[in-house]
Image: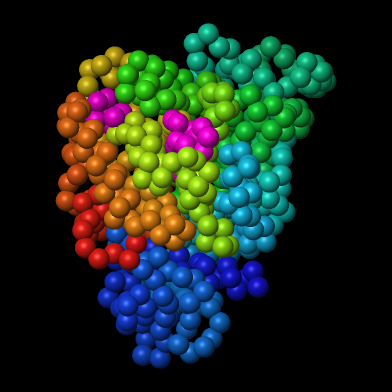
Amino acid sequence: MSWETANRNLIVKAISELYFEEIFTDELSETEKNTYTLKINEQVNYAFKAFKSVWCDLVIDADTLTRSDGQILDAARFFKETQYLTKMGDITLANFLEEMFYTLYSDQVLLQKPISVEKMYQLDSLEIETYLNGHPKLILNKGRIGWSPGDLSAFAPENSNTVKFVRLAIKKNLLTINCAKEHSFEAIATADLSKHEMNHLKQICNDNTIDFDSYYIIPVHTWQWENKIRFFFQKDISSKNIVFLSSTGDDYKPHISIRTFSNYSDRQRYDLKLPISILNTSCVRGIPSHYISVAADISEGVESILKQDDVLVEANTDCLKDLAAFSYVSPEYSDIQDAPYRYKEFLGAIWREPSTTKLKQHEKCLMTGSLAFQDNNGNSLIGHLIDKSSLSIEQWLEQYFKKVVIPLYHLQSQYGIGLVAHGQNTLLKLKNSIPSGLIIKDFQGDLRFNKNLPSRTRNKFSVLTLKKIDFLPAEHIIYDLITGHFVSVLRFVSQALFISHRFKETNFYHLLGSVISDYENNYPTQSNIPSLMTSNFHRILLNKARFTIGYHDSAQRPRPELGNPLMNPLLAKGHFHG
């Protein structure tokens, strides 16, 4: 049954998100209260029960979805039937179906390992991620094009297997490296190797007649070595600029983001982000070289602000610093200015502080995106946390808004710093199941500056960092919070809480609006960002962007499109089921 269920769930998600993105608006109608029909043609329609969210998407009861002709639910047929609405060309549609089949394969793995929120509550954050469904907005969120079923079994997070990394010796003069002050790049890069393992690697270097002290020992994901490095760096391998040593060191487990790993042998050791050049969600997952030279400086500047600002200290806001990084772009591609980005992101790494080092006694943390998890009985993880706490729903949510939303907004309002605050970049600290703080991470590409950057923020970063970081207009950077957290996290959290606890979405966002209004009254913006209490938000379209641009190569990562404005739920009034 998992194949049928996976197809049903994917069609449900597609209808909901494509209604939100205004692609199905004209063909979808409410035939009676909370019963909807999507017209395909004169002979076929899809019917289902749903309620309309305050975000103008549909929250669909998957078990009620039927086709008018009685045929089984088939996702491939659905996307072909709706091609005239999505306006995908045939080439894009064919590629889309390939990504769909990969997604369905992994969806079935998750369906075969159900877990209750009671059991999930007992797990740590890394283990929780093995049960999560992936990006909530992107229809195809487990494409991983390039991986075989064997690769998925070995490396995909839902399979919860550990992995050891390949160790290469690479000539020091080839790499762009960066390291935090008072740290050694070499010490960080080999921190997960025992003395015995290091001696073994030195012996292999001697056997290859290379000078150990002229090389850095660096980790590479096994798949990346076999499928990319051995092909694209043959010249360097032939000349012994790059030497394969061994697969050794500590065991690691992948996060839901695929290419970030936590040390499973010692959870106090560094997290590691490595390129795995497969297409997953919006792009091929390499490591961009652009930010490598300023990785540590970005982190140190952010941490300095978090430690000195009274609001952020009071909110218990932390960050996971990037402590070291390296990149090597093959000379064959480095001088091709508009080469597809993936060719320049094959070889690199980022070493990051683990979340375990940021927790006080009796604290735990989890991805904010995991709060929306619902088990097969309709119970939500956020609802279970509230039940386990000593607080009412309103009290718990108020703590969340003050500990998570306000710090993110404060960084924007007072410092001109925007972080794409999606469910992976923001970790919720919990103490006795109550929100106690926030951890932010992943600053290389997901952190941007407001063009109205206050001088006190400029003073925290080097001239080179200020040149490397993207600067956005105030009216754009605020969407790192609105789209990143409100639409991509809280939208699904509020819906899950309504389903499990019948807590109305209007009450959820009225409370959020009240907390934000109090903040805005007390802290006038220092970076000219617009108020979050404005009447409308921009509607960001992620899936439509894929339909439009297709799957062809580009020099830059894809960017989303804009739709018609959304009514701001923080001001929502009217009749919403949720």
In the image: residue 536, left or right of residue 123: left
Q: Is residue 318 visible?
A: yes
- Residue 78's x, y, as percent? 47, 76
Q: Residue at x 42, y 81 (%)?
A: 46
Q: Quadrant of the N terminus?
A: bottom right
Q: Residue at x 52, y 61 (%)?
A: 378
- Residue 331's x, y, as percent? 53, 31
Which color mode does the image show?
A: rainbow
Q: Residue at x 76, y 29 (%)?
A: 248
Q: Quadrant of the C terminus?
A: bottom left
Please report the bounds of the magenta region as a residue range. 410-437
Position of residue 327 relative to residue 143, above or below, is above
Q: Residue at x 42, y 87 (%)?
A: 44
**409 or 289, which lies in front?**
409
- Residue 162's x, y, as percent? 71, 40
Please identify the quarter of the rendering in which residue 476 is found.
Answer: top left
**212 or 279, which lies in front?**
279
Residue 455 shown in magenta: no
Residue 420 shown in magenta: yes
Q: Is residue 346 visible?
A: no
- Residue 10's x, y, as percent? 50, 67
**128 or 235, which lies in front?**
128
Position of residue 380 relative to residue 295, above or below, is below
Position of residue 80 relative to residue 493, above or below, is below
Please identify the quarter of the rendering in which residue 210 is found.
Answer: top right
